Image: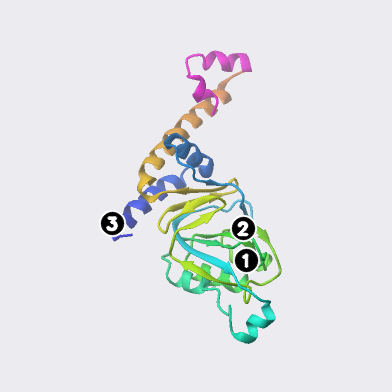
Amino acid sequence: MTQYDRATVAADIARLTSIPDVSAAVADALDALGIEGAAIALAPLERGHRAIGPAVTLAYVALPDNPASNRRAGIGTSLFDRELFDGAAPGDVAVIVCPPEPVCAVMGSISAHWAALAGLAGCVVDGAVRDSNSILATNLPVWSATRAPIAGRYRLAKKSLGERVTVAGVFVDPGDIVVADDDGICVVPQTLLGAVTDLCLEGDRVERSLLATIAASTSTTDLRRRLSDVPPDVVAR
């Protein structure tokens, strides 16, 4: 991204941050624009965390042979996550994609501490993590498909760094905006961030108005009376 792009993106991210249930708001906005951008198969390591930022990407491929053989041969010694973090800007979100097999962790204590030091807003791992308690101690927001004690070292190799990846069926290009919270993850194409943000803020305004109307109502009958002139698709939010 150019410096201007980063300034524009940062302004839109700041606007999105004001929305309470932000991934749901973004999912609704993507629906309105006809974009498939929700990756619902990943869960946060700790509830209450959220991350919104440009994606930096890394993908792995499974190595042949067994870990002991690969270790003796010096194959798979580096997972390149440090290179990913070193090349990221503060506020970026690391998106790391693993093959379905073998199930092994590509983020643990050292990796999480490194990412936190680099200033990443969070990490999204379509695969496994380990050292969960140590990761939580860093306060780094992390989402993953699962957990596993087995290391990815000597089992996986870098497939790509800084290229398009697929996370839980959703394409992610470097610079796309990752929005992650307790409900899951959404990916916003960078060129659509402004439009998505505008839709999210309008949706949030409508939802706050509906909640205020509910709070002011004395019964559901009273509520329906108050909402009689509101379009059904708005009430059904």
Point 29% across, 60% down: residue: 3
Secondary structure of the residue carrying tag 3 is helix
Circle nearer the viewer, 2 or 3 = 2
Secondary structure of the residue carrying tag 2 is strand
Q: Residue furthest bottom?
A: 72
Give the residue number, with chain letter if any, for mark 1: 135
Kind of residue at disc 3: Tyr
Q: Residue furthest left?
A: 4
The location of residue 97, given as percent across then percent down, is 55, 61
Circle number at residue 4: 3
Secondary structure of the residue carrying tag 1 is helix
Q: Is residue 133 above or below residue 215?
A: below
- Decide which of tag 2 and tag 1 comes sooner along the chain: 1
Along the viewing direction, whichever of 192 and 166 lies nearer the viewer: 166
* Horizontal relation, residue 6 to residue 148: left or right: left
Circle number at residue 224: none
Cα separation, mark 2 vs mark 3, equals 32 Å
Give the residue number, with chain letter if any, for mark 2: 144
Magenta highlight range: 220-237
Kind of residue at disc 1: Ile
